[in-house]
Amino acid sequence: MMTTKLMTHDHRNIHSEIYKMKRGPVEVRVIPAMKYVTQEMNTAYHMDWPGRPEPVDEQWVVWKVVNQLKHLTKNKLSYKFTLMPHEILWHEKNDSRSLTTQMMQVPDCITEEIFEEACFNVEKRLRKKLPSMQLVSHESNTCVQKLHSGHYQNSIETLREIMNFADQESLSLKTSYKEIYLTPAMKCHRPETWQTVVSVETRNSGVRDE
């Protein structure tokens, strides 16, 4: 009996305005509603890690759960998807410890039931209790964003450009800001080639838990 080969869905292409953002000036974008697996953190960060900051005091396990979600959606829903870039929402950024929400975008077909099964499977495999994570739906919102090229340590320069643009356009922004680390965390990529989307939501944007 012949089996049909499943198509792999790359959400970088589906949401190319975010995950394949090109160099250019600061711009205002309407971001579509999307789902994420999130993990709240209060941690210091290695800020010389290839491609993205690496938490020091807490373990980043969202990617392990998302990998399990890939397996479950393929077998249960016949839906294959690629792993998405790491994202960090910075609430308070300090040299010692920072308050953040680390996240990864996932397909809309993932339900709370499948998410809980993925967490259970990862916990069983690791033989230890996982940190608290959530499946969260972000409603469509408006962001001011720009692609930062170079080391993410210097992304504050791009954030300042965004803040100046918002002041000039009389836009009210939220205090937290997001960085999306587009470059894979591998040493073969030189820091000057790293790409990070810096994005700040305008006020009155909504989020709801599943």
Image (cartoon, rainbow, N blue to C red):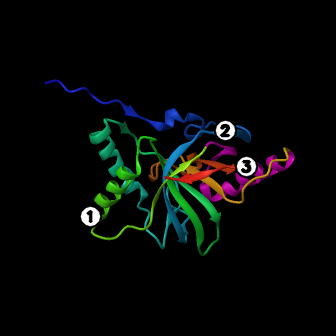
Instruction: Identify the amino acid type marked 3.
Output: Thr
Magenta residues, as a range?
140-168
- Callout 2 secondary element: strand
User: Going by the picture, which residue comes out furthest to the top?
Assistant: 2
Q: Which residue is mark 3?
A: 202
Indicate yes or no whether the magenta region holds residue 148: yes
- Callout 3 secondary element: loop
Q: Which mark is residue 30?
A: 2
Taking the image as shown, residue 130 lies to the left or right of residue 17, namely left
Residue 47 against residue 190 in the figure, above or below: below
Q: Position of residue 84 (x, y in %)?
A: 46, 45
Residue 181 against residue 49 in the figure, above or below: above
Q: Which numbered disc flags the more N-terminal residue, 1 or 3? A: 1
Q: Position of residue 7 (x, y in %)?
A: 35, 29
Q: Nearer the viewer, residue 69 or 198?
A: 69
Q: Which numbered disc flags the more N-terminal residue, 3 or 2? A: 2
Q: CA distance from mark 1 to mark 3?
A: 40 Å
Indicate yes or no whether the magenta region holds residue 95: no
Instruction: Identify the amino acid type marked 2.
Output: Val
Q: Which residue is mark 1?
A: 124
What residue do we see at 17% from left, 24% from top? 2
What residue do we see at 62% from left, 54% from top? 178
Residue 18 against residue 5 in the figure, above or below: below
Q: Nearer the viewer, residue 59 or 130?
A: 130
